[in-house]
Image (cartoon, grey):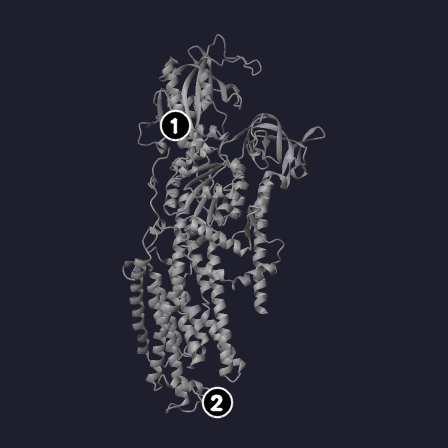
Amino acid sequence: GAFFIVVALINAAIEFYQQQKSAALLSTFLLMNPLRCKCIRDGRLSRLEVDSLVPGDIVHITRGDKVPADLFLFSISDCKVDNSSLTGESEPQERTIPNKMQNPLEASNLAFNSTVVLCGEAYGIVIRTGDKTLFGQIASLTAGQKPRTSSLTHEINNFVKLIATIAILTALVFFGIGFRRNQNNVSLALNFAIGVFIAWVPEGLPATITLLLTIAAKRLAKENVLVKDLQAVETLGAITMLATDKTGTLTQSQMTVTNIWTCGKLLYASNNFSSENEEKVAAPDDPGMRNMLVSTALCSRSIFNRTDGPLKERGLTGDGTECGLTRYVTVHLHDYDEVVRCHSKVFELPFNSETKWYMSIHQMPHMDGSLTLLMKGAPERVFKFCTHILIGNNTQISALTEEHKVSFEEAHETLAGRGHRVLGFATLMLPESKYPKDFKFDRVSQNYPLSGLVFLGLVSLVDPPKQGVREAIGACRSAGIKVLMVTGDHPSTARAIAGNINLMLSDTNVMVAKGKERPTDSTANDQCNAIIVHGDKIDDLTDAEWDSIFWKDEIIFARTSPKHKLEIVRRAQSMGHIVGFVGDGVNDAPALRKADLGIAMQISGSDVSKEAASMIILNDHFESLVRGIAEGRLIFANLKKSIQYTLSHCTPQIIPNLLFVLVPIPLPLPAILILVIDLGFELIAALSFAWDPPEGGDDLMKVQPRKPVTPETCEIFRRRALRKTRSHFDEEKGMVVAPENETKFQKYWYRVRLVFNKQWWADIFESTGAEVLIDWSLLSWAYLEIGVLETLGALISFFFVLWRRGIYPQDTPIMQKGSGPPTHYWSKKATPYKGIDGLSQARDLLEAQSIYFWSIVAMQMFNLFACKRRRHIPFGRYMFANWVTFLSAIVGGGLAVIIIYVPKMGVVFKTTQSLWAPYLLMPIAFGLVIIAYASLRVLVVRRSWPVKWQADIPGLQLQRGPTS
């Protein structure tokens, strides 16, 4: 009864913890909502609580506001919003009344709750509030996802069930035998059963695993990886698929100038984007660069928050593209402040989706007047207004020729083909005769010139990859992890970034068809190893199409919604993938929660994403994730070695209890000493594995994942999943059907009956090619190989000590059978046996039990070193790489000596200080046999079952270098 009460309390605690996590997650969503907004009520514009909004209200939003609800915009003035947290689009989205998009997420006349207004203003009608908004739906979707049981937990649970079943059955059997052998004495029989049960169960194993994971988590923290759930440490090393958001995760979420084309030359903006081709890095004194820098500085709407102090320390607000241009100019235009102050803006026309350009007029004197017109925008639109082109510094211009047009088009196509955002710049010096200094320009009458402009050049920008992302993704792919991009951005933008970061090196069917100038349908997807899936198609994908997508090596999902991301994770998991999802936005939260391992970014990540994730990258560097994967693989290897070592002492603990009942012989190892071994020496020694370095140096990231996904393993995984849920595929309905309205008891009873199902046992022994934490090889080593060797060594030492005292092995059953009345052998009041009085018998048994205890400890010291290496013989420099191993052996051995030889310890632990010290050397011989056997076994295993190395992927760039 007490056992079930404890189980119930544990389950209640776990459920309470999960509810608290869900509540905390919802609270982070609430913090992102604005508290007040501007709303028209009773014909007046007033500030109201957001909670009071209802559908039909008219709301006014302006620059810097958070949108309080989902709005249908009917009046817009140069309004742009930042949708990145909801949709993943990296660029500001312009709001316009005409809308051509059917997808609500792409509609230009909608503004969504919690998004930020970057510039302009708008009036909108509330169409959804609270939980019904897109933001609210994401919150509900996230809170509704239950975290999956980790692979480590699942494997440990299976082992615990196996050992518990064996322990209980063995205890029951020997309870019955002991009951018959001891004249129906329930007390003695129960003691036998408890002893057998304790011997089977490795009591220190849960503490060992927890402490090993804790030590690994602390080590990960030093690598800037914060673990919220200890199980995530090992899961990180086990992932087979890594799905990642783009904006803010792979990229810097900051538009950056990459290239400048002026005076007929294509230049790199900085060394960060230079390469080995002929394009050189732009310098301020290059022809045309001064004109481009000044025009970019003035033709802008970005604003610094202050005018004093160094430029790089000032805050900058405005459109992302504008801010990117301004940041570049402030670095290369040393008189930036003076240029802006001396050339004040007198008129401007904001950018809009119809014209696709922005124009400003400045007090900028020249030979013919005092005003200068500057324009930037879509290159083809700006170029149409031009009749001349800049060919040198200042006023060196030339009339546009066909050659100039061809050069312009080639430069534009080159930059656009790289996935960059390209802007064209132009200027016109306004004559004093027509446009005097105090001329009043007017938007309505359009009394400004839009022809005869001088084309200055092109500037391209990109949201560049973060430093080290390319090498990190290359390392992941080299380690056999399938890396895919899941983004809300446009497919072409996603493809351009993916090509620069080792994520997509080959062509899709669309790209192949385009290169061969054929229709897209002429090239089948099966002929290509890469694919880009648009979000509009995701909802209509069949099961076969999903499988076809995931069997590709290089995958991009573009224009995805939060629901799509969740479905992508679910579909990958249904194939047997252990999925890691990396994201930083609100739209990533459901997928972060659903994935086997949700990974958020500390700096760029939203509070919602960090709450939903089970791991956080503290410095936002993707490289930290790679180091975490290596650490996860290392901790799995070390956990396996630690468990292999820990379980090895179970056999020499179990066999004495069986012999005690079956033969019988005096009990060689009392229950108290079993607990000392499990919770004392073994726990100390097992923890030393936490500091073991990788066996082969850096080859952890060169081996296949421990649970690779293949068509064969996918079939096995799905078959087992259907059986566990009593589901089957209905051919008439064309879908998987599961029993409906099942009670918890019915589900539990079905799982119990599975144990007696032939197929359940077939599944256990069926090979999937996966490496599990506790496999048959490990169990064989622990229970049959080293376990038997240690049992033999300990029993020989046990009987040797008794023999030296005059008690032969054949005497022990006789004396044990007479341990009760009237002879009471082995006790101080025993009848003398072969001239050995009762005191001597009791002393001799304690000495024998002491040497049995010491034998296990001593042989486990040798086993400790034998388990250190799984692929190499236990010799060489590696054996000295972890000084904690030697420390733990010394401390554990010292603890055993103290228990044996310190006075009064024997009373508690049933040992004796009368044991002759040289006897302690006997187990060393068996320890050397263990080392020899381990060496031989390694040679056989290495030849018969070689390590599965991951094949090299051609084209991966693993050395740090410039990106383009």
Q: Which residue is mark 2?
A: 821
Q: Secondary structure at mark 1?
A: strand
Q: Residue at x 56, y 16 (%)?
A: 443
- Residue 941: image location, x then y, percent: 32, 60
Looking at the image, residue 948 lies above or below residue 32: below
Q: Is the residue 53 above or below the residue 761 in the image?
A: above
State the image quarter where residue 555 is shown.
top left
Disc 1 residue type?
Asn
User: Relative to 717, is 945 on the left or the right?
Assistant: left
Residue 458 in the image: above or below residue 584? above
Furthest toward the right, the residue is 42
Q: Position of residue 883 (x, y in %)?
A: 33, 61
Instruction: Give me the C-alpha separation between circle 1 and circle 2.
Output: 99 Å
Q: Which residue is mark 1?
A: 259
Q: Is residue 897 visible?
A: no
Identify which residue, 555 or 753, lies in the foreground. Answer: 753
